[in-house]
Amino acid sequence: MKRKLAAVAVLSATALLTGVIQVSTAAQAAPTASPQAQAARQHATALAVASGQAGPLAKALGLGDKEQLVAKDAVLDKDGTRHLRFERTYAGLPVIGGDLVVHQKADGAVKSVSKAVSARIALPSVTPKVPADQAAAQATGAVKATVGATLDADQSPLADVHQTGKAQLVVWATDGNPRLAYRTTVEGVRADGTPSSQVLVTDAATGAVLSTHEKVQTAAGSGNGVFVGQVPLTTAEAGGQYQLKDDTRGGQSTTDMGNGTSGNGSPFANTSNSFGDGTAANRESAAVDAQFGAATTWDFYKNAFGRNGIRNDGVGAVSRVHYGSNYVNAFWSDDCFCMSYGDGSGDAAPLTELDVAGHEMTHGVTAATANLNYSGESGGLNEATSDIMGTMVEWYANLPSNPPNYWIGELVNLNGNGTPLRYMDQPSKDGQSADYWDASVGNLDVHYSSGVANHFFYLLSEGSGAKSINGFSYNSPTYDNSTLAGIGREKAAQIWYKALTTYFTSTTDYAGARAGTLSAAADLYGSGSAEYNAVAATWTAVNVN
Ligand SMILES: [Zn+2]
């Protein structure tokens, strides 16, 4: 997928990064800024204050050294009083019921604290007795046991459970008795066709269900996309019609370009709150893919990295589908803060696959962070970052209709013979991409010089050699004939994201990427840790030394 180069005028993020303590309620924006822009600026500044104070406040509140505060929101009163809202982690685990609000005077003095739970958290260990897979199975079993039962008069009974969710280790503090627990989301469908997404918290020692809640409210919409199949969608209601607009994710929306190339398109609106029929002939189906792709990318970045939208400012982007005529591509533009999807050959094969959505929006993340120049080796790293995170979005969604893998665009069939656009396990399989670094790799088109970093990411995640992963076969080679074990894609993605957002700059090349990811691995896992050593060995395996 190409990236439309834009004369980027990304808003300064300086206010978010500084540790400013003094906040004035006087307008800090330029006098010409709209009231909304001023409010957004003030909120960003207040959030920066909250972030800057998270450490000192944790100490002042007497939290243990394993506890950390994570700024979530901040409200500024006219008299300068501020209300800083935090979530909490314990040994890096999210604490459910760990949220608190610190009320401060204008001079920073703490007036009072509102805590969800006052109990101290001191766990003897953060090693769970029940393994994650078993916990996920227990949670899924508990939901399956309710199929057919009418538990809530407002909801149609659960008809089916699609798949076992992934169990995330957390600390459950809500009942005042903090202990290790798992949070598992179990997807299903209700008898009336409404999707179900139940979040269960189970005790990590006993497996007992501690809480259950349904994320899909009956007002939520649903869609049937070309590639994503039947999925839940958060929609907006206006004038008796539902729109593909998601106010829970920065207001991101999807519009119909009507096969034109100018303007922002028209919103998709429908009286039934159900969009698309799974065929490309129905104009809503591609829109369902795009809207779901945007939502999943939003959720992935939020849950994996705590990122609040593409620019980390809570603002959602616009997805424009049915762009152009016979347009066989998709692109991101910083100018319109939007992505556009063509309908492909004969306007019958939209480019709205999930890893493409994740790829395009990641160009926006890169623009807002390292801003890697889109040429030479840095351009290859820019493209690879999009392929890496696009792939991670696909794994995050884990859709039955689009089983995750390490290939790019394997469903859109751009080659016409059913082969993927790009292969991360062995990039040269596309006939153009580089498996390994050499001095001329920066002369390749950025979609091919990306191969070295894509290969690095695959090897770091999964290791070398022949293997089958999630039903797909790979046989990833190494330049130095070394055998690598891999550290898992989650850790590999954490390292890449940290490097992208803290160490990479516009001019980072492959040697710089090696140094930056090593610094990131040292920050995350320790210098000389297994992860750090794996990063070093994996770069060597793609001839970056
Ligand atoms: Zn791209």
Image (cartoon, rainbow, N blue to C red):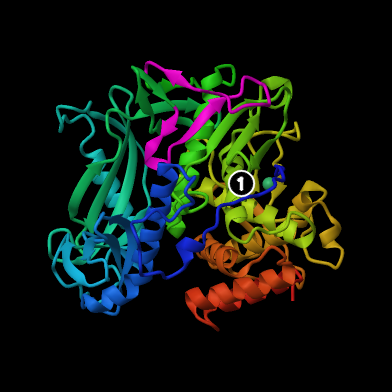
**Residue 520 pos. (x, y %):** 55, 72
Q: In the picture provided, is 438 more to the left or to the right than 12?
A: right
Q: In the picture provided, is 455 more to the left or to the right than 124?
A: right
User: Is any atom of residue 382 visible in this view?
Assistant: yes
**Residue 88 pos. (x, y %):** 29, 65
Q: Residue 509 in magenta?
A: no
What is the three-letter code of the residue carrying label 1?
A: His
Q: Nearer the viewer, residue 534 or 306?
A: 306
Q: Residue at x 29, y 56 (%)?
A: 76
Q: Nearer the viewer, residue 272 or 44?
A: 44
Give the total of numbered labels: 1
**Residue 82 pos. (x, y %):** 26, 61
Q: Residue at x 31, y 77 (%)?
A: 56
Q: Nearer the viewer, residue 221 or 163?
A: 221
Q: In the picture provided, is 94 more to the left or to the right than 539?
A: left
**Residue 541 pos. (x, y %):** 72, 71
In the rendered view, tell whether residue 14 sits above or below residue 326. below
Q: Nearer the viewer, residue 196 or 503?
A: 503
Question: Is the residue marked 1 within 8 Å of ligand 1, measured from its CB?
Answer: yes
User: Is any atom of residue 424 visible in this view?
Assistant: no
In the rendered view, tell whether residue 64 sits above or below residue 256. below
Start and end of the magenta stretch?
A: 244-272
Write down the quadrant of residue 158 in the picture.
top left
In the rendered view, tell whether residue 528 sits above or below residue 136. below
Q: Residue at x 33, y 17 (%)?
A: 240
